[in-house]
């Protein structure tokens, strides 16, 4: 998953205050990634990637948050 795709995913999930239980939000992420990048990923793959970003990849998550703050 590219950095730009992760930024898009984090942006949508943060705006929707995603907590891992709302399937409609993850469906929105799937559609957005497919529309903008042509990537097809399952909800489970994206859910795992989101979890990995928050729990294991702190530095990359901080970089994504900085990019999102600069864009607003």
Image (cartoon, rainbow, N blue to C red):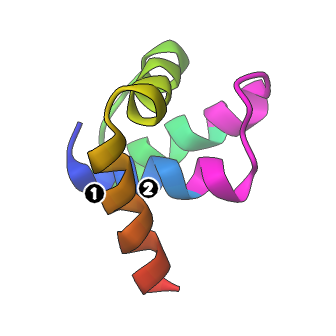
Was residue 20 drawn as part of the magenta stretch in this picture?
A: yes
- Label 1 sits on a secondary structure element that is helix
Residue 28: % across, % down:
64, 42
- Picture residue at 44% right of the left edge, 63% below the top: 65
Q: Which mark is residue 8?
A: 2
| Foreground of the two, 10 or 66 | 66
> What span is in magenta?
12-27
61 shown above or below 40: below
- Label 2 sits on a secondary structure element that is helix
Residue 11: % across, % down:
54, 58
**Circle 2 crowding by C-alpha within 10 Å: few under 14, some 14–19, many from 20:** some
In the image as oriented, which residue stretches furthest toward the left? 2
52 shown above or below 54: above
Of the 4 image quadrants, the one containing the N terminus is: top left
71 shown above or below 31: below
Q: Which residue position holds label 1?
A: 4
| Foreground of the two, 16 or 57 | 57
2 and 1 marks in contact (CB < 8 Å): yes
Residue 46: % across, % down:
46, 26
Residue 24: % across, % down:
76, 33
Left of 63 or right of it: where is 65? right
Left of 56 or right of it: where is 3? left
| Foreground of the two, 64 or 43 | 64
Instruction: Locate residue 38: give its quadrant.
Output: top left
- Picture residue at 31% right of the left edge, 34% below the top: 57
- Picture residue at 42% right of the left edge, 17% below the top: 45
- In 3D space, how far apart are the residues under numbered discs 2 and 1 (Cα atoms)? 6 Å
Was residue 54 drawn as part of the magenta stretch in this picture?
A: no
């Amino acid at each position: 998953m590219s950095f730009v795709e992760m930024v898009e995913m984090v942006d949508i999930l943060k705006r929707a205050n995603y907590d891992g239980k709302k399937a409609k939000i993850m469906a929105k992420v799937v559609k957005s990634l497919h529309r903008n990048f042509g990537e097809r990923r399952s909800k489970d793959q994206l859910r795992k990637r989101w979890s990995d970003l928050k729990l294991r990849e702190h530095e990359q998550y901080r970089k994504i948050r900085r990019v999102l703050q600069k864009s607003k």
